[in-house]
Image: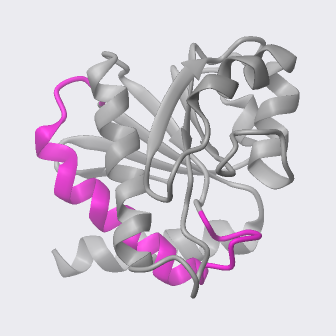
Amino acid sequence: MERKIEGITLELVQGDIAAQEDMEAVVNAANAELKIGGGVAGAIHRGAGPELETACRPLAPIEPGEAVITKGFKLPNDYVIHTLGPVYGRDKPGSELLADCYRNSLLLADGESIESIAFPAISTGAFGYPKQEAAEIAFRSIGEIAGELNNVSKVRFVLYGEHDYQVHSNVLERILQDS
């Protein structure tokens, strides 16, 4: 699925975030210490190799909503942008912190002259954020910041499962109809 939001091409695909060969940057749904973990963090660290954890060490810890950048090492991407999503019901205000993940990642990418970036569904796995609410926050955040971006022209959401893809697809269609 591909749509335009404020001049940005927004794609939704089902797949593996660590296998986005045509994207300059991928976003890691990181833990505070920027170490290998489960889910997205595990896939990205395994794909990048041990050099990624070494590069992350001086950047940690990060706070919810914050974003930092490293090289992609053995990934097919030049960069990895690491962001810490909020834990649903614990980190407050959750919606603002989640929106900050997307805004800060996009601003960081734009500042590095990155044109294409792939996101996972931040905080919807182990951090328990409801998928529909998280998708709404993500797409609205991108729409709000798109006008400030000079370099980023393509944003892809890489959704691991069919259910996640359908939820995000339905939310995106509804948001575009409402605007």
Q: Is residue 23 visible?
A: no
Toward the bottom, the furthest residue is 89
Quadrant position of residue 164: bottom right
Q: Is residue 154 above or below residue 13?
A: above
Residue depicted at x 49% and y 74% = 134
Q: Which residues are magenta?
A: 123-152
Residue lying farthest left?
147
Q: Image check: 178 left or right of 67? A: left
The colour scheme used here is one colour
The quadrant in which the C terminus is found is: bottom left
Quarter-of-image position of residue 16: top right
Q: Is residue 133 magenta?
A: yes
* Camera-nearest residue between 131 and 72: 72
For the question of whether residue 120 can be seen, the reply is: yes
The residue located at (34%, 39%) in the rendering is 106
Comparing 9 with 117, the one in front is 117
Q: Is residue 164 left or right of residue 152?
A: right
Q: Position of residue 154 (x, y in %)?
A: 37, 34
Q: Whole-percent x and y of residue 93?
A: 38, 79
- The spot of residue 159 in percent (x, y) is 67, 56
Residue 40 vs 71, above or below: the answer is: below
Q: Please name the predominant secondary structure of the magenta segment in the image.
A: helix
Residue depicted at x 55% and y 61%: 85
Q: Is residue 172 left or right of residue 51?
A: left
The residue depicted at 47 percent of the width and 71 percent of the height is 135
Q: What is the tally of numbered marks visible in this picture? A: 0
Q: Quadrant location of residue 77?
A: top right
Relative vertical location of residue 2 with respect to residue 118 in this rendering, above or below: below
Depth order, front residue of 8/146: 146
Please say whether residue 118 is one of the residues in the magenta stretch.
Answer: no
